[in-house]
Image: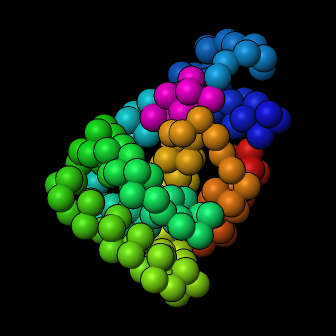
Amino acid sequence: MAMWDRLKDQARTLQQTQSGGRGRGSSSGGSRAQLVGLLKSQLASAKTELKSGAYRDAAMAMCALVAAADGRVEPSERRRVEELIATNEVLQNFPPDQLRKLFNEHVDRLTADFERGRARALEDIAKAAKKPVEARAVVQTGIVVAGADGGFEASEQYAVREACAALGLSPAEFGI
């Protein structure tokens, strides 16, 4: 899909920038799993900068917003995202129980009243707008969560674009 190719190219550009432009790679090939892995690596490299409560709250709101993007959250999807939360290297900066609680509170609000839950999630996401590294990390976290099942559905892309707007970032920066 062209979307994944754009994300892959954007991730490669970020990686080359972080390594001083020495990295080389072709614009073809690569899988979604490799892209998600690359985004996880980029997040991990910023781990020391991602310890604030604003990032924690925004990341959990982003996870919930992406999980509920299609209007529902199946129990298996909730468990999968909870597992990602518990095993994500960057999110290990925070107590796992605290993260699960925040994520589940957002999911519960989104499933009870999607519009009100969405507004609250975007409010929490916007908390990370003050720090560009955190803001970009929130979007990357959303893309990692969306790509965990091997796809990036239109509803998930829309949720990530909304988060970009709340954070003052251009979706084009992320190939969306």
Nearest the eye: 48 or 92: 92
Answer whether residue 33 is magenta in the image.
yes
Answer whether residue 15 is magenta in the image.
no
Q: Is residue 55 visible?
A: no
Provide the residue span drawn in magenta: 32-40
Identify the residue shown where x is 48% and y is 69%.
125
Q: In this view, does 126 lie above or below 133?
A: below
Point out residue 36 in the picture as x, y percentages from the top left corner: 54, 33
Point out residue 18 in the picture as x, y percentages from the top left corner: 54, 29
Identify the residue shown where x is 31% and y is 44%.
83
> Is 30 situated left or right of 95 in this image?
right
Q: Is residue 104 visible?
A: yes
> Is 125 situated left or right of 87 in this image?
right
Instruction: Name the quarter where the N terminus is drawn.
Output: top right
Identify the residue shown where x is 48% and y is 76%.
110
Point out residue 63 in the picture as x, y percentages from the top left corner: 45, 58
Q: Is residue 36 above or below residue 121?
A: above
Identify the residue shown where x is 33% and y is 67%.
104
> Is 30 situated left or right of 108 in this image?
right
